Structure formats: structure tokens, C-alpha cells
Image (cartoon, rainbow, N blue to C red):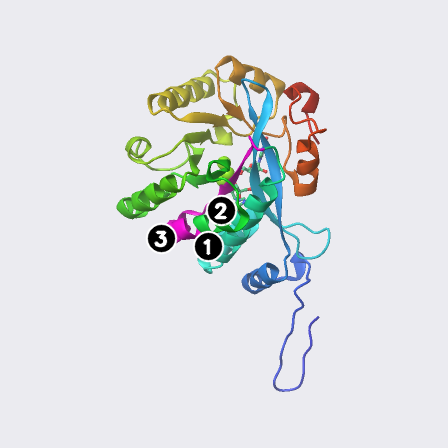
Amino acid sequence: KAKQGGRNQWIFYSCEMSEHLMQQRDMARHLECAIAENRLRLFYQPRFDLNSSTIAGAEALIRWEPSPGEWIMPDRFIELAEENGLITAISDWVLETACREALSWQETMYVSVNISPVEFRSGNLVQRVFHALHKTGLAPARLELEITENITFENPQHALTVMQGLHELGVRLTVDDFGTGYASLGYLKAFPFNGLKIDRSWMQEFPQSVQSKRVVEGIMGLAQAFSLTVTAEGIETEEQLRQLKRMSCDEGQGYFLGRPMPSSEFAQLMSPSGEGKEPINTLAPVK
Ligand code: C2E
Ligand code: MG
Ligand code: MG
Ligand code: MG
């Protein structure tokens, strides 16, 4: 709704508004509204244990539904949220929602949540994660935090302190988008990471190009040197899956194995009568 009146013009927008009507500058305000009015959703993309061909857990991926049936992807608003300081409120909602929804899955499964590097600047990330676990009752070992390597860049000493605090809570810590950032390899040794996720850009020419194959092999060698589990992101073909299994990659994620899906759909997949324990091939490709 937009109203205009005489000299003192004023404009009023309802929280429910389609994206194309939003100006970039209005978007932050609408996003704030979206948090309050519960218009954020989590989708879940399965993460497979490639050794046993079972679902090990899922990554929570945020979507914004400004009006029913209209979806805005995170690439369109996470950066904005980081710039406007809204990321903390969003992330608190993500953490709590992911922890609560994971409670209905099988007890062996974990949920992974993306944490923005800017959240490492403030000192209270450890308390916020503790709060989400405490409030929902999810076991810390069932929560994984995905963090890009850029956190080691700005203030390494502070980032290390925060990481150690998170590690002591008992949550798993994973490097996201490995192979795209600028950090030195030393941080793999210095920081208490449990795993790394190979960025999907390295999957694009895998396994056809010799170079991409060597890069993936190289990353897996590094991971082994630092005792990290490896997840390959962006698996889109059967051939990629086969190769990664042959290379003994620990976990896999991608459209070939399962697309991000609404939480109800994922929970159904996970229900005792669901297919969570079936071999990958009966699940793939999930539309
Ligand atoms: P990410 O953490 O690297 O997540 C993986 C992205 O790749 C997701 O995009 C996922 O849908 C997509 N993807 C998965 N498999 C495939 C595949 O086989 N092929 C291709 N082409 N893409 C695939 P999405 O959901 O649009 O998320 C984009 C990024 O937004 C995420 O990258 C993450 O950095 C960020 N993000 C998502 N949710 C959150 C959140 O709750 N908090 C924060 N801070 N960032 C988030
Ligand atoms: Mg991620
Ligand atoms: Mg990633
Ligand atoms: Mg990313």
C-alpha cells in the first residue's frame, strides 16, 4: 500500500510486498519487517555420507518469502543484512529454527548453518549459539557451523578466540567454499576446524579436466594432513559422484543428490518410514 497526501507526503508499505516493487533502499526496511512478521524460511539440502550412501545431515539455506509463493534467494539479501546490522537478528532466527527443526530428524543427523564472517566481529557469537542450543535442547554435536575462510583475515586473534569458544561448546566447525578465499593455509592448522567443503566452482569441470581433478585431489590431501572431513559441494552428475566416491571423499551435496527443499519435505524424507537410509541412487535425482 502506498499513500500520498498533500505537502507532508508519506508513504506506507505493508510488510507483504513483492520484490519488484521494492527499491534497493527499501529492502533493508522490508527485511527488518520480514523478521518480525515471520516471512523467512529455511530450506534444507541433504548432505550424504558417500561411504554408506545415507543422509548424514542437511544444510539450512535461508529464503525470504515477501509475499506468499514469491521467493528471494540469499544472494539478494544477505550482503544487505550484513551492511545494515540485520544479520545478527536473521542469524539468531536461523540458528534457533534450524536447531528446533533438526530435533524431529533422526538422532544421528546434524544440521549445518551458515555463519556470516561479520558475526565474528562482535564478541557474543558463542553466547548466541549457546542460547539457540539451550533453548531448543539440540545436542551441540548435532550442530555444524559453516564459516568461510575470510574470517581469518580481518582480526585473526579475535576470530581464533571466538572459534575456540564455539569448539568448546561442542559444535562442529567447517570451512565453507574452500578454495575461493584469500587466507593462508596456516589457518587450517591454527583454527579448530572439523571439516572443509570444497567450493562448487571446483566441481564445474570435474572430473573431465585434469586440472580440476588434481585440485580436488590436492584439497583432499590437505584435509587429510589436518584431519578434516571433506564435503564436495555442487555435485550435479552421476559421474562426479562416482569419481568422488572412488577418491574416498567423505560427504557430498548437490542437485544430483537432492535439491534444497522446504523443512516439511525434508522431515518427511527423514521420518522413520522415509527414505533416509536408502541408497543414494534411489533418492537421486531428487527434484
Ligand atoms: P553456500 O553456503 O555455499 O550454499 C550452497 C549454495 O549452492 C546454495 O545456494 C545451494 O542451493 C547451492 N547449490 C547446492 N547444490 C548445488 C548444485 O549442485 N549446483 C549449483 N549450481 N548450486 C548448488 P543458496 O541457497 O542460494 O545460498 C547461497 C549462499 O547464501 C550460501 O552459499 C551461503 O553463503 C548464503 N546463505 C544461505 N543461507 C544463509 C544463512 O542462513 N545465513 C547466512 N549468513 N548465509 C546464508
Ligand atoms: Mg554453506
Ligand atoms: Mg558453500
Ligand atoms: Mg557461499
Identity, as a three-letter code, of the amino acid under mark 1: Glu
Disc 1 residue: CB within 8 Å of ligand 1: yes
The tag on residue 133 is 2
Asked whether disc 1 touches disc 2, contact meaning CB atoms under 8 Å apart, the reply is no
| Residue at screen point 40% across, 31% down | 194
| Residue at screen point 59% across, 40% down | 102
Residue 127 locus on image (x, y percent):
40, 52
The tag on residue 82 is 1
Residue 255 locus on image (x, y percent):
62, 30
Residue at mark 1 to residue at mark 2: CA–CA distance: 23 Å
Q: Taking the image as drawn, is residue 208 in sight?
A: no
Rendered position, 76 above or below 284? below
| Residue at screen point 52% across, 42% down | 138
Residue 278 locus on image (x, y percent):
67, 21
Residue extent of the magenta highlight: 107-128
Q: Which marked residue is nearer to the observer: mark 1 or mark 2?
A: 2
Rendered position, 50 above or below 184? above
Image quadrant where one finds the C terminus: top right
Q: Which marked residue is nearer to the observer: mark 3 or mark 1?
A: 3
Frontmost residue, 88 versus 24? 88
